[in-house]
Image (tube, rainbow, N blue to C red):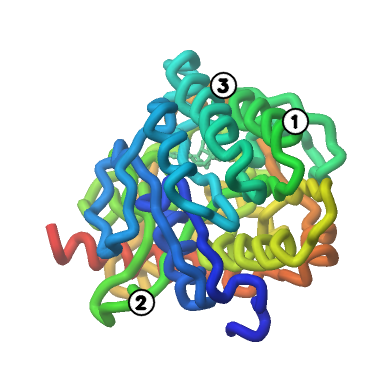
Amino acid sequence: MQHLFSQIQGRSVLITGGAGYIGRITHALFEQAGATVWVLDNFSGGQHPLRTKRFLQLDLLDSSSLQQVFTEHAFDIVIHLAGKIDVGESVRRPDFYWEQNVLGTQNLLNAMHGYSKNIIFASSAAVYGEHAYPVTERTSCHPTSPYGQGKLEGEHLIAKHSPSSIIFRLFNVAGAIPHPESVKQTLGEDHQPETHLIPRIIQQHLQGQSFSIYGNQYPTPDGTCIREYIHVYDVARAFLYGANQLLSKHPSQYQRTYNLSSGIAHSVLEVIQQLSNLSLQYSYGPIHYTIDNARHGDPSHITSSISPIEQALNWTPVHSSLQNILKTAWQHQLNHLDKA
Ligand code: UDP
């Protein structure tokens, strides 16, 4: 792998939010590529302990400690994943989301100033809002939730303060990978509480509960929301390709924004159907669901064009068939049930 990512070998990488779902998997991949990885995280999501010693337990709102981190360490690149991620909660607590996601990003950029210039920012497809057609990076952004508004503001801050940056707009990340150090374990989604569609359906099904669909009166063929799901390993790979690109450039100004998705769309009902098939295959029975109220802030469609990222970074999603996402997510939730 090293020769493909010649710029990563021996580099010092800081991952904010590195104890979280995407962060742990990104961490593993960058280490495999020969980087020295540091994690900065406040552990607010109830994450499991990390095995690394290169760990800074810190909140992005603690600006003086953050400043100190950058005066003490020389990071070649920062991968900024830290932030709150629940669209529904952002509607209930907009000020909290602004503080965590926008002020946190501003503090990080202030602390980096004069010390680290390269940054990759995990933004979100939520910046686009409601569009019935596949969005490109040039599509106008009209976020429908405070979460999406905060991510868009984070993008503006990066554009203003960081001359060497890649912004990835992440679509719906899901799936799991085998644990790099233990054959019996997996690295996957463990949010507390879990709000994301795929792990929620599996968890509730394995606990014998019926699943609630948030609304079936959307303007889509089956009435449920349409999203693009991307395997978390493809996301971590894109960060690696992006970091390699940023570190190989030496111009004073290099700023890019890419959709990071699979380009394959599915409705909530389709996801349930495919999971039901998988469940029957594993002799767990069909998934039962009910229709609940629509969740405030949810756009009906979020679909994308991914040809710009494919052309620019020479990256393409290779693990993101819905079948692979669901199988790996299922295995991860089963492992958790075994431990409970
Ligand atoms: N969803 C649902 N029931 C749930 C959780 C999610 O119907 O318990 C729907 C949600 O309304 C959205 C889709 O699943 O249409 C994906 O939601 P998720 O929270 O996973 O990601 P988002 O698209 O909000 O970032």
Residue identifier under label 3: 146
Closer mark to the observer between disc 1 and disc 3? 1
Quarter of the image with the C terminus is bottom left
Classify residue 44 as left or right of residue 14: left
Q: For this rendering, which residue is in front, 236 or 197?
A: 236
Q: Residue at x 35, y 77 (%)?
A: 180
> For disc 1, does the CB lie below 8 Å from ligand 1?
no
Residue identifier under label 2: 180
Q: For this rendering, which residue is in front, 158 or 287?
A: 158
Disc 3 is placed on an element classified as helix
Q: Residue at x 47, y 77 (%)?
A: 32
Q: Tell me, yes or no, whether the two marked residues, 1 and 3, touch with CB atoms within 8 Å.
A: no
Disc 2 is placed on an element classified as loop
Where is residue 145? Give x, y as percent. 59, 23
Marked residue nearer the N-terminal end (1 or 3): 3
> Looking at the picture, which amino acid does disc 2 mark?
Pro
> Looking at the picture, which amino acid does disc 1 mark?
Lys
Where is residue 238? Give x, y as percent. 64, 63
Where is residue 216? Give x, y as percent. 56, 34
Q: Residues within 10 Å of mark 1 (few under 14, many from 20)?
A: few
> Looking at the picture, which amino acid does disc 3 mark?
Pro
Marked residue nearer the N-terminal end (2 or 1): 1
Disc 1 is placed on an element classified as helix
Q: Residue at x 52, y 67 (%)?
A: 233
Q: Residues within 10 Å of mark 3 (few under 14, many from 20)?
A: many
- Residue 160: which numbered mark, if any? 1
Classify residue 125 as left or right of residue 296: right
Relative vertical location of residue 324 with respect to residue 159 in this rendering, above or below: below
Q: CA–CA distance between discs 1 and 3?
A: 21 Å
